Image (cartoon, helix red, strand yellow):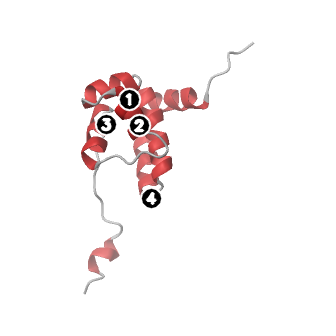
Amino acid sequence: MMKSRSHDDAMAELYRSDPAFVVELINRILEDGDQAELLLVLRQVAQAAGGVQAVAERAQLNPTQLYRTLSPKGNPALTSLSAILKAMGLRLAVQPLAASVANSSN
């Protein structure tokens, strides 16, 4: 009989095996602007990156603060979000929406 795994564990395994997928997924969520979904994925990525405790240490946050920040009702400050992403080997970046947007002010 196969041991049942939680969805989060399965996603963490996927994220560990395919870091490019993580980047694509987070960027897609950021485009949609769904903060609750972003925090859910970041919790799963933290799990994949060694667990919340390890990520908290690397981000220089206490684990309780990190759990609260990544909770469904969390609202991370930009400095916290940047530190958390960096601890997971990621960073925030800005990209143009499309070539036509830059020229739309003419």
Q: Amino acid at mark 1?
A: Thr
Residue, disc 1 = 64
- Residue at 41% across / 51% down in the picture? 27
Which numbered disc covers residue 68? 2
- Which of disc 4 and disc 2 is earlier in sequence? 4
- Which of disc 1 and disc 3 is earlier in sequence? 1
Residue 8 point in image, percent of width and height: 55, 31
Say few, some or many: other residues with alpha carbon within 10 Å of mark 4 (under 14 / 14 to 19 / 20 or more). Answer: few
Q: In the rendered image of this protein, does residue 88 appear above or below residue 104?
A: above
Report the residue that reaches farthest toward the top. Answer: 1
- Quick one: quadrant of the C terminus? bottom left
Report the residue that reaches farthest toward the bottom. Answer: 106
Q: Amino acid at mark 4?
A: Gly
From the image, state whether disc 2 or disc 3 is nearer to you.
Answer: 2
Q: In the rendered image of this protein, does residue 19 appear above or below residue 76?
A: above
- Quick one: quadrant of the N terminus? top right
Q: Amino acid at mark 2?
A: Arg
Q: Are marks 1 and 2 in contact (CB under 8 Å)?
A: yes
